[in-house]
Amino acid sequence: MLCFHENDYHVSRRIYSNRVFDQVHERQAQEIQSLRERLGRKIKGLLPILDWLPKYPVKQWLPGDVVSGVTTGLVCCLQGVAYALLASVAPVYGLYSAFFPILTYFVLGTSRHISVGPFPVTCLMVGSVVLTLAPDEHFLRPVNITGVNETVTDERLMEVDGEAREAQRILVACTMTVLVGLFQVAMGLMQVGFLVRYLSDPLVGGFTTAAAFHVFISQIKTIVSTLIDVSRNINQTNIADLIAGLLTIFIVMAVKEINTKFQHKIPVPIPIEVIVTVIASAVSHVMDLNSQYGATLIGKILGSSFSTAVVGYAVAVSVAKVYAAKHDYTVDGNQELIAFGVSNIFGGCFSSFVASTALSRTAVQESTGGKSQVAGIISALMVMIVILALGPFLQPLQKSVLAGIVIANLKGMFMQISEVPVLWRQNKIDCLIWIATCLASIVLGLDVGLLAGLVFEMGTVVVRTQFPSCATLGNVPNTDIYKNMKDYKNIDEIPGIKIFKCNSPIYFANIDYFKEKLREEVGFDAVRVFKKRNKALKKIHKLIKKGKLQATENGLVPVASLGVENQAFEKEQVPELDEGASQPDSEVKVQVDWTSELPVSVSVPTVHIHSLVVDFSAVSFLDVVAAKSLKLVCLMLYLYCSLLSHCSNAIMHLHNMIVTFMSLQTCMTFCLPQNTR
């Protein structure tokens, strides 16, 4: 019965242990669905479009999706072409990567807002693999020097066979893209989408910041036109590329800042990348920068990509969950694995590189009114128009302009550095994870750096669980509230009862630390007390046999000399210790109140508590090793021990000495004497 009175409430109910509660209230049997229902639910799970498309509100959502699709499509085109530079392939494959993956994600994806396509981090990882397996040195050929009367082949002069190099690079990229897709599909079918949860926000933040650093360094060479150290070869800078690149960075970042600042007043963000590209292509064509200044041009739009499946999936799902929470719907992580896997397999067959999502592009799709992946299909149509009709117009475009677009889009990733002071104030370990991952990714490379960051993160988890936070709880007077004794002043410890709380799982790695902290809080060594009491019992038996002490017919020592209360352990109950801690002779059954006055010759440590309550509300699991050790400790404490909540099946095997309760207050009510409840 629950009663309320002003600011107080009063509860009156029966005291339940977990075992009694299960006996009184039977568990409800799970409802078994028919095969047809399960099959239908499974098909809709694998093909989410069958669930949401029939319910699509055309009048409410279609106008916003059209505007969002057109705007996002323009951004996709330019980002696809620009990010292809990071993958070390020709730009046309960036357009393919912005087109084909969207077609399959439209059918299989569960996020309504992410824009599927190239992402700078994954593109850079693709580029590192492509350059490793297909470097320029593998495609050198002799240069023919033509004189007035004859042509001489000088073996000392070599040039790169561009066509052979691009063919090999596209083969490497497409093969790896299909393999990445197969891995993602396999992981999705095995329902291991939860693995991405091990990539925490601090780890991803440090990794992407390091990736932005690598992207910035890789694109600087395009702007200053040198492949060696930038500062040492500054005199080799191409003036046309330098001016074009710096102007692009300045203009794109300035307009993006305007879009962010006035996003509530501007219905559609200014497509600055498109405007800059059109102007730069026109200027390059009119001024003939290729012949006048030797500016590097795009030429044939070719390309490919390879990416790390885990990184691309982790970034995409993280962004998808942010917008899902904002718009009140759910994202299925395992289905996202299948969706991206199929998209990568499909795209790899059509010369695309690994699909993920770009944060800035997704923000454009959502902020311009996108409500579903219909906006994604419309953006794919815009990309297709560029591929079929507008590709030749991009040939005069300088690579430095595309490099400027890439660098300008790194602003958000570099701004993640501002999270470090905030993380330091909130949680220093998370801050160390961010810094360690970032430094490792910069020094060791993205792939090894990510692995190093993950290992460091797992190490912090082990350390935190190996040395858990433990505390003694006290009661707020006249309430059922229990708090840490060290955190508050006006709380009392209940006489004779010790409440101990552990804020971590208890398992083989931290059980010794748990026992040490428990011994400190209880105030005595259970093993020492156990041995002393057994020696005392042995001595008492000898005194009884010698007639110096008298025992009643019931085997009780007279109260005047020893007192009568708690029962000693039976022989079969005593845990195995050593030969020195032998049991007393079982001829006379003796019950001793160890808190009463004992004979002068009998000395045992004083124990001032009669009950130990271990609060397991923060313990997620208890393994067999910990359960066995905990039972042994409680057995040797000579105490009544109460454990809270079901941590694992191992706890249920402790029923001989340990009783579990459903709440701390229920346990305390059971422990307190009847007249004090």
Image (spheres, rainbow, N blue to C red):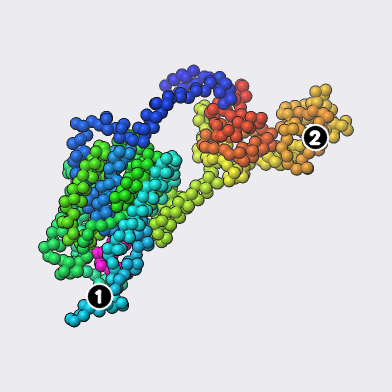
Indicate whether residue 413 is drawn in magenta. Answer: no
Dots 2, 1 in contact, CB < 8 A: no
- Circle nearer the viewer, 2 or 1: 1
User: What label sits on residue 584 in the rendered view?
Assistant: 2
Q: Quadrant of residue 20?
A: top right
Residue at image location 25% in from the left, 57% down from the top: 302
Residue at image location 58% in from the left, 29% down from the top: 660
The foreground one among 527 and 191 is 191
Question: Which segment did they paint magenta?
Answer: 217-229
Where in the figure is residue 498, as x and y percent of width and height? 60, 34
Earlier residue among tags 2 and 1:
1
Where in the figure is residue 31, as x and y percent of width and height? 46, 23
The foreground one among 623 and 476 is 623
Identity of the residue furthest to the left in this view:
286
Q: Which residue is mark 1?
A: 144
Residue at image location 64% in from the left, 40% down from the top: 629
Does residue 624 appear in this view?
Answer: yes
Callout 1 secondary element = strand
Where in the figure is residue 334, as x and y percent of width and height? 40, 40
